Image: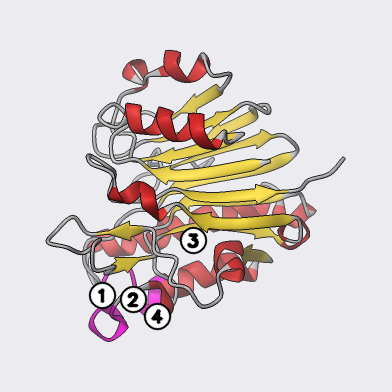
Amino acid sequence: MRIASWNVDSIRARLHLVLDWMDRHEPDVVCLQETKVAQRRFPRVDLEQRGYDLAVTESDGSGGVAMLSRVGLENVVIGIPGAVAPLNQPRSISARCGGLRIHTLYGPNGRKVGTQHHAIKLAWLSLFRTWVDLDGMQAAAPTVVIGDFNVAPADVDIWEPSRYRKRNLTSPPERAAFEAFLDLGLVDVVRRCNPTEPAFTWWNRRSDFYETDRGWRLDHALVDAVTADRVRAAWVDRDERAKEGSSDHAPVVLDLDLGH
């Protein structure tokens, strides 16, 4: 099974790039973030014609998440059950796809350490972690948590650690929030498969950040320990970021051998 995650920074603006990528790589499940489109305007037809079932959150034009699957899409939960304002945001989708419980997320950005936005980010990540735990990890269900966490969890995940270590995206509280997912027994399989490479997934659009590889690893794929042993490859398609009109994020891809 091939599972992909991609912050597309507007599905309507980049639909041609997404469809081309899907046609070439043939993923079984695709998780999209920052779709930036209302449910009624999501481009369903092009994806359904390729055999995908869809689950889509609402979006006010600045966020939005979608899950596409051609191996089943059952027991769909949009958002975190029971969440109340300001944490009841349409930032996640959970569903059963081909024997796996897959959670995809678009974590809050946080904007600046010490602000209310940053506090909400930490609270949302903590609540989402609890939901992942209750929804399957406690029962040892095969689980994948994949998407844009908006956290660079270690110094290797950022191009200049000394400059950014205490700022938003890389601050100690955010890194602790990411580590809390691993404490559930989830495995950061992209890092495990690429132990020394930066494996950046996002490059700022300013200047020549991509050309000079000044990036961050903000998009992650976490898998329960049993399923992690079935991961044949976990990689970032960084070449996609180089294309004209591309998103500022690159796709993250998992290849699993689930057997029978």
Label 3: how many residues lie within 10 Å, few (<14), some (14-19) or many (20+)? some
Q: Amino acid at mark 2?
A: Ser
Q: Amino acid at mark 4?
A: Asp
Which region of the structure is painted magenta? Answer: 160-174
Comes first in the chain, label 4 or label 3: 3
For residue 155, which numbered disc appears in the image?
Answer: 4
Q: CA distance from mark 4 to mark 1?
A: 12 Å
Q: Nearer the viewer, mark 4 or mark 2?
A: 4
Q: CA distance from mark 2 to mark 3?
A: 15 Å
> Which residue is label 3 attached to?
126
> Which residue is label 2 attached to?
171
Label 4: how many residues lie within 10 Å, few (<14), some (14-19) or many (20+)? some
Q: CA distance from mark 4 to mark 2?
A: 11 Å
Q: Secondary structure at mark 1?
A: loop
> Which residue is label 1 attached to?
167
Q: CA distance from mark 4 to mark 3?
A: 22 Å
Q: Are marks 2 and 3 in contact (CB under 8 Å)?
A: no
x and y percentages locating residue 79 in the rendered image: 48, 39
Say which quadrant the N terminus sits in.
Answer: top right
Label 2: how many residues lie within 10 Å, few (<14), some (14-19) or many (20+)? some
Q: Nearer the viewer, residue 91 or 7?
A: 7
Q: Secondary structure at mark 3?
A: helix
Q: Are marks 1 and 2 in contact (CB under 8 Å)?
A: yes
Q: Is residue 37 above or below residue 147?
A: above
